[in-house]
Image (cartoon, rainbow, N blue to C red):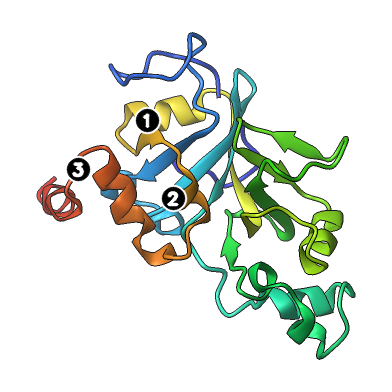
Amino acid sequence: MAPTGKRTGESTRRGGAALPNSAGYLDGRLLIAMPVMGDSRFERSVIYLCAHSAEGAMGIIVNHPAGSIDFPELLQQLGIIKKGEHIKLPENAESMKVLRGGPVDTGRGFVLHSSDFYIENATLRIDDGVCLTATVDILRAIANGSGPKHAILALGYAGWAPGQLETEIQSNGWLHCDADADLIFGDDVDDKYNRALQKIGIDPGMLSNEAGHA
């Protein structure tokens, strides 16, 4: 039901849901997991869709912390900074959260970031305000203070095969809404799910009650 491997979605009718462009694709929007999904890996997930086309879809979960992984410690493991040098990191790097981006390629890092930073042939510009870069160069830039103003590091990603995301949406597995910088990059990770629901006028408490009586 929910993504488990490399996947990417063919455009179909969405059961009456309003879609952002004439092709019917959702790239640059947020997916919000419904309780009826039944996949614990995506429970209360908010996913930023980086790509969605006839070939499938790919996104990053923006509200699930990756356990106790610490960003400065990760920089040390990668050899970007030496042990003890975390005290020299700029504030946005020192406090940067590491998230669990999805079940695919969990050993690889993906940085969602503001569009004030760009690496030729490495950065994917998703919309006017958000880009995706998956090379270690952006981590070096963040560590030395020349990186983007806003960024999150996610380990792994979520993906869908052609037509799969459409099927899940039609089965009420996902809602979707416009993305905004606070929901993507905001520090209050634990509250992003409720705020995403509220953004489209849904009371999280009511949603839970309805799911419990389904």
Q: Amino acid at mark 1?
A: Ile
Q: Which residue is mark 3?
A: 202
Measured from the top left, where is residue 118 in percent x and y? 79, 41
Q: Which residue is mark 2?
A: 183
Q: Amino acid at mark 2?
A: Leu
Residue 181 sits above or below residue 103 on the image: above
In the foreground, 12 or 5: 12
Residue 69 sits above or below residue 22 on the image: below
Q: Which of the marked residues, 3 or 1, is nearer the chain's N terminus?
A: 1
Measured from the top left, where is residue 76 in percent x and y? 82, 79
Mark nearest the camera among 3 and 1 is 3
Q: What is the CA distance from the residue labelled 2 to the residue labelled 1?
A: 21 Å
Q: Which residue is mark 1?
A: 169
Q: Secondary structure at mark 3?
A: loop
Q: Which of the marked residues, 3 or 2, is nearer the chain's N terminus?
A: 2
Mark nearest the camera among 2 and 1 is 2
Q: Quadrant of the C terminus?
A: top left
